[in-house]
Image (cartoon, helix red, strand yellow):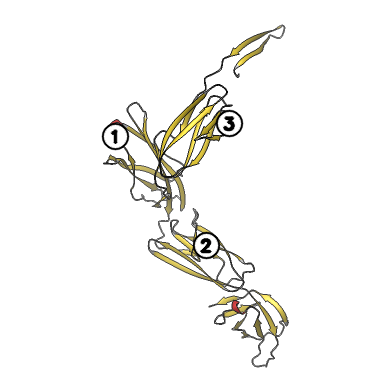
Amino acid sequence: FSAGTHQVIINADNGFHSVSKQVSFEVLPQPLSLEITSPANNTTFDHNNITVTGVVSDVSAVVTINDQEVVVNVSGEFSNTIELGSGEHNLNIVATNDSERVSQTISVIINEALEDEVIEVTQGNDSSVQSTIMSLSDEQKSKLTTYSYNLSQLPEGLSFKFVRVYFNSEGVVFDYQFSASSSIPVSQHSTELSLTLNDSENRIIATKIVPLVVSIVDDQKQGLELTVTSPTKDEKIRSNKVFIEGHVNHLSALVEVNGDNVTVQSDGSFSHELVLDEGNHIIEVSVEYNGETITLDEATGQAEYEWQNQGWSKWLGYYRVIPQIAASIDRKAIWTVGQGFTFKGNVFSRFFKSKKLGMGKESLTAIF
């Protein structure tokens, strides 16, 4: 019940007789309370997007984070993601209703924005040992008694362990590694390593969240492999939009299509759209990993033509093709048109009498 005076009617019935009674009561206003559930004070992040969550006792209260109002649900809970630059920040969370105002301030530290670290694990083996440091003052070091951790979205077949935890001049260092079973499929997984340090009374001294990407590598694959599945070499393209699709066997490899960086998906596949002018084109797909580079070329093209009957002999007949877009034809290439007939430059090397004369448009494919 909300604050104020209320009445309820209570009924009792035994099947033969019933009675009822009305009861009046008053609900006194409850003090407004605000609880921040995440992040903890003095949390360190290696990324810029911070999600602030909490709960307020009055669902009608207005909640703001650094003066920006956030949505409160019917249970009084709220969640809002904000983007911060590197450095230390104070987040001021305020809840206000008709009669009260409460607030909390928490401090967060944003390290320089880092890309998610990619850790490769070969099937049936351990990863190399990774390290992360939580900076602490001498006073914080003296109070530290326990630590805890959590890993989000860790798949079956992939395990985690600490190799060593120790102090250095900066704070406390966590050395860790991942282990992959031999049956886990080749894949890539994003996770967050959350670390929490506590004192003897279980109060939080510091927390840190480290974004990670764990890449499972096939134990049979050694060298770098690149496959372009579309378009196939010499394919005829009837649109100026061309989708370059393929697969690479190392998920952390750098893939480029005509110099543009392309995202590699968790299964090793990639796709990139190109918009090309009419004509023949060489599409360069390259991949680089650990100093090894593979480059593949795909040729595609389209041109208009005009048939002209130049005569023929029974020993060597030909039709001459006059290209309407001269720049689109590489005369050093050998081209195919229609049903496998070829010509070099603009003269067909094989006679076929049934071809109709006149104007037309055909996809041409270069054969190098």
Provide residue 366's location: percent of width, then percent of height. 57, 76
SS at mark 1? helix
* Residue 194 appears anywhere in the view: no
Q: Quadrant of residue 346?
A: bottom right
Q: Earlier in the sequence, mark 2 or mark 1?
A: 1
Position of residue 164 relative to residue 317, above or below, is above
Identify the amino acid type marked 2: Gly
Residue identifier under label 2: 246
Identify the amino acid type marked 1: Lys
SS at mark 2? strand
Position of residue 199 relative to residue 184, above or below, is above
Q: Single out the mark in the foreground, 2 or 3.
A: 3
Provide residue 221's location: percent of width, then percent of height. 41, 60
Q: CA distance from mark 2 to mark 1?
A: 51 Å
Q: Are marks 2 and 1 in contact (CB under 8 Å)?
A: no
Q: Nearer the viewer, residue 295 or 110?
A: 110
Give the number of the disc on residue 73.
Answer: 3
Q: Earlier in the sequence, mark 3 or mark 1?
A: 3
Q: CA distance from mark 2 to mark 3?
A: 45 Å
Provide residue 43's location: percent of width, then percent of height. 40, 37
Compared across the picture, whether 248 is left or right of 329 comes to left
Task: Identify the residue at image location x=54%, y=59%.
Answer: 271
Task: Identify the residue at image location x=56%, y=17%.
Answer: 29
Q: Nearer the viewer, residue 263 or 83?
A: 83
